[in-house]
Amino acid sequence: MRYSAVELLTAILFTACYVWFGPTWLTVKFCIFSFLLVGLLFMDAETGFLPREFTYPGIVLGLVFSGIAPTDSSGTQLFLHAYEVHFSPAQVSLLDAVAGALAGAGFFFVASGVYLLIRKRQGMGNGDLALLAMAGAFLGLKLTLFVIFLAPVMATVYALIWMVRHASDAGDGRTSLGQILQSWEVPFGVFISASSLGAVFVGEPVWQWYLSFF
């Protein structure tokens, strides 16, 4: 029996979730998250679309699981303590999920608006923003910051490699590199999904490594 790349990757991620988190609600939470991300990753890579039938229910599920299987909400707790606001752990977890969703979608909404003003063309679709909100709802504020940093880095590296590979098309005189770039779009949902998966498994260790410098 042959399995598709989607099925194999999903099976590997489900196994990794169990190894990382054990027989807990976190495993269930991140298995569902991984299932959604893998589907969206391949859909964006193949079609350029991120269906809201996946992202919108994903946002709701992320918020629901914030109460069932909370992640580290220290990022939101830091802001609450700064303003001397006190909530129950369940409320803090929900606020952290909401903050993650707003931070992910909000940051790139502003970035997309700036890009539109400068380049006079849309830089990011609503599907990308919904995917970022979904990731934030599942991951919480701290790990969403990890995604905000990593996804553009991965997309930039991919774009540079793509330009180098297609430089020969511009060099033969048939078309300019500018024309090639105008007709090409980075499938940003692929990198949001990939960096979100990375956040699930290595986000916390990376954060601890980063904070060790301070």
Image: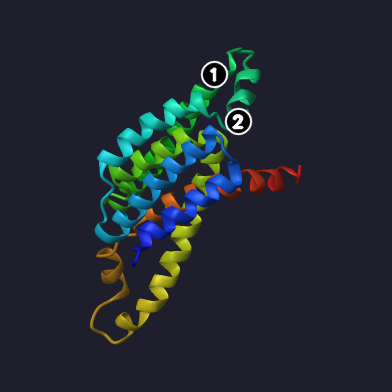
Q: In which quarter of the image is the C terminus?
A: top right
**Category of crowding for the residue at label 2, using alpha-carbon neighbours closer than 10 angstroms: few (below 14), some (14–19), many (at least 20):** some
Residue drawn at (32%, 48%), measured in percent from left and top?
Answer: 124
Callout 1: SS: helix
Residue drawn at (26%, 70%), measured in percent from left and top?
Answer: 179
Query: Residue 107 in the image: x percent, y percent?
Result: 44, 39
Residue 75 is labelled as 2
List the residue tagged with mark 1.
90
**Which is more toward the observer, 8 or 91?**
8
Say which amino acid is labelled 2.
Gly
Residue drawn at (48%, 37%), measured in percent from left and top?
Answer: 28
Say which amino acid is labelled 1.
Ala
Residue 195 in view in this figure: no
Query: Residue 14 in the image: x percent, y percent?
Result: 48, 49
User: Which of label 2 and label 1 is nearer to you?
Assistant: 1
Q: How far apart are marks 2 and 1 (CA)?
A: 15 Å
**Which is more toward the observer, 177 or 41?**
41
